[in-house]
Image (spheres, rainbow, N blue to C red):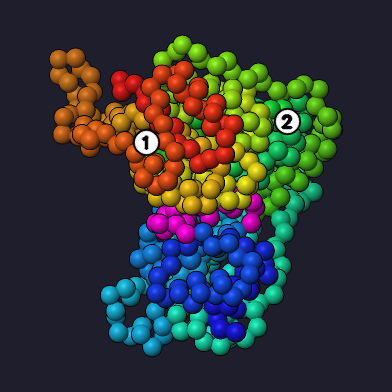
Amino acid sequence: MNGAECLLRTLIANGIDVCLMNPGTSEMQFVSALDRVPGMRGVLGLFEGVCSGAADGYARMSGKPAATLLHLGPGLANGLANFHNARKALSPVVNIVGEHSTQHLGYDAPLTADIEAFARPVSGWVRTLHEASAMGELAAAAVMASFGPPGQVASLIIPADFSWSEAGEPGGAAMRPGRSLPTRETVSGIAATLRSGERVGLLLSGTALHVRGLRAAHRLREATGVRVFANRNAGRMARGGDIPTAERIPYFPEAAQSLLANLERLILVEAKPPVSFFGYPGLRSSLAPAGCSFDVLAALDQDGVGALEWLADEVGAPSVPTSSPHMARPEIPHGEPLTAAAIGRTVGALVPQGAIFSDETVSCNEQIWPHLAGAPAHDHLPVTGGSIGQGLPVAVGAALACPGRKVVALEADGSAMYTLQSLWTMAREKLDVTIVILANRRYRILDIEMGRTGAAAVQRAAGQRVIGPRADEMLDLTRPEPDWVKLAEGFGVQGVRTETADQFIREFGAAMKESGPRLIEAVLPRG
């Protein structure tokens, strides 16, 4: 068999049966092999950032990698922003990048680039294939590397001639690395800390924010009074229904520092010490109070869920907590103006059990997030690395990974423009995604950040900071206003505009009863 067939058979042998691709000439052998090797679902993205973001969403929900297939250095470069988000989400991805044939590399052709240099900043593992006979072995190694732990992007660069050359047998199933537990001394020491009377918090991230981890953390809270916090930028968090809650670290540093102000110790579970998203004049970057000590219960590559359960047993926490964390569903906001809070209440009231939220809201997030706590049990996929344009592709990947679950993409209008091509893939693959575009016709978060960074001009008469007219042009999304209904329909997705809460309630309710994809533009006040 040739190298492309060997690669494909190796991926399938390792349980990788979805490949998100935007191929070119150097990848044609792989594309051709799809018709000869059964078992791989090829999914076309019209832009490489859709492929990398969808691979991220797929991994967050399935716990295993999808493959991506990209064309040379420029194709990889187009996908880097969402590979950055995947890296921060600790998502396993097997990223296959085609290269020029080896005899052509010395000619500095127009598309020649240093692909390894492009790949390294977003990848935990980068290799270039140097002979066709090593295809199966190296492909299996890429799969194993993608799992970490923690998960990471593993980039495998394949010269075109190794795809059409004889390659021998495919690689076998690679051993999936396990996660270790902390030492007994670590668990005993942290149990003693919880009994010490100090003001202690738990900061959860990674797998610790899945259902089992949150239930174990709730046992610890019931038994010791420890406060439980969630990394707001973790790749996935279980929430709603009877799933125990965790206090999410706020976006802005003042609120985050206030939340953590009284802590003397913070126990990290698959988490790093918390820092602010940006640095601001006169503010500390660290969110924990000065003098706060950090204890690591489970490192990023360890089993945070098992560690929490062990710690709960160590402190004698009841196996079944006495209190119920269930919260009431929000009331539907009939007759109200259409605001972000009204959208949050509507979504929380009408979304079905088991929904998945791909959430790329920033300025509106704190108005929506609290209302989702009363929704039935769901998974929340937030912004991780902050590179704009993850929301729609992550929704694509989540829908591919979980075809029986409703996916709701809560998306800012400015962010959605970065990877608008995702709509076409949703339509072609008939994915059950409802997209809610929060359309305020503005990069609203930058209005806030302009003042916070001290960049806004001071208005002399009032002594207030204001945005000047030329600067305002750079934050404004009007003249013309994007028509989301027409944009959606142009990609084959049914779209509708809503301007009142009752209109949104009607359209969102209908979307929850029908299979998607479907887009709802929610026009918000501009003030």
Q: Is residue 237 left or right of residue 499?
A: right
In this rendering, is residue 207 above or below 340? below
Classified by dominant secondary structure, the portion drawn in magenta counts as helix
Nearer-N-terminus badge (2/1): 2
In this rendering, is residue 103 above or below 240? below
Where's the N terminus, which quadrant? bottom right
Q: Looking at this view, is 247 or 429 the one in front?
A: 429
* Residue range corresponding to the magenta coloring: 44-64
Residue 108 visible: yes
Q: Residue 91: horizontal and vertical position, in percent?
A: 57, 53
Amino acid type at image mark 2: His
**Residue of label 2:** 218
Kindly check if marks 2 and 1 are in contact, taking CB atoms under 8 A apart as contact.
no
In this rendering, is residue 409 above or below 221? below
Residue at 74 percent across and 40 percent down: it is 212
* Residue with the most extreme top position: 335
In this view, the mark in front (2 or 1)? 1
Q: Secondary structure at mark 2?
A: helix
Q: Residue 318: horizontal and vertical position, in percent?
A: 84, 30
Q: CA distance from mark 2 to mark 1?
A: 44 Å
Q: Secondary structure at mark 1?
A: helix
Residue 85 visible: no
Residue 132 sits in which quadrant?
bottom right
Q: Residues within 10 Å of mark 2 (few under 14, many from 20)?
A: many
Where's the C terminus, which quadrant? top left
Residue at 54 percent across and 62 percent down: it is 42
Q: Residue 63: horizontal and vertical position, in percent?
A: 65, 52
* The disc label shown at residue 485, or none: 1
Q: Looking at this view, is 206 or 443 the one in front?
A: 443
Residue 189 sits in which quadrant?
top right
47 in the magenta segment:
yes
